[in-house]
């Protein structure tokens, strides 16, 4: 009724945020714990990716500093310079 009287199920296609009863042709709603676990999973993945990237940068910097101290910047082996 009201504003939704002329809408069909096709009007909601592509809106994946909608959920409800199957008779409305939308996915079932997840309970709160399922939503939280998916959100927590995404946070853990993001934290691991950021942490891994940070660790990689630190290792590269330490290798560069070590190379500079040992041989001087112009005497670094070719494989270190490529890194």
Image: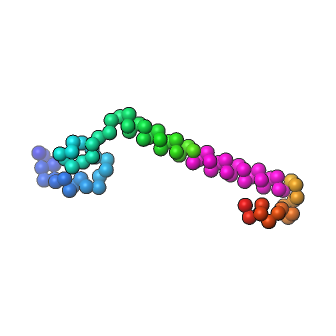
Tell how many labels.
Answer: 0
Left or right of 45? Residue 1 is: left
Question: Would you say residue 77 sits in the magenta stretch?
Answer: no
Depth check: give the residue in front, 31 or 12: 31
Please name the residue shown 38% across and 37% down the image. Answer: 34
Q: Quadrant of residue 39?
A: top left
Quadrant where the image shows the N terminus:
top left
| Render colour scheme | rainbow
Vertically, is 72 above or below 16?
Answer: below
Which secondary structure is most common in the magenta stretch?
Answer: helix
Q: Residue 35 location in percent, x, y?
A: 38, 39
Question: Would you say residue 67 sits in the magenta stretch?
Answer: yes
Vertically, is 76 above or below 24?
Answer: below
Vertically, is 17 above or below 35?
Answer: below
Q: Quadrant of residue 8?
A: bottom left
Please name the residue shown 71% across and 49% down the image. Answer: 58
Q: Residue 83 location in percent, x, y?
A: 72, 61
Q: Residue 61 location in percent, x, y?
A: 74, 52
Among all residues in the image, which is located at the extreme top?
33
Left or right of 72? Residue 11 is: left
Please name the residue shown 52% across and 41% down the image. Answer: 44
Magenta region, residue range: 49-68
Left or right of 65? Residue 23 is: left
Please name the residue shown 72% across and 53% down the image. Answer: 60
């Amino acid at each position: 009724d009201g504003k939704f009287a002329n809408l069909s199920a096709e009007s909601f296609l592509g809106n994946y945020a909608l959920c409800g009863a199957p008779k409305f042709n939308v996915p079932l709603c997840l309970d709160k714990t399922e939503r939280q676990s998916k959100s927590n999973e995404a946070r853990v993945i993001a934290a691991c990716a950021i942490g891994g990237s940070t660790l990689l940068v630190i290792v590269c910097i330490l290798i560069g500093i070590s190379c500079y101290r040992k041989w001087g910047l112009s005497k670094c082996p070719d494989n270190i310079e490529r890194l």
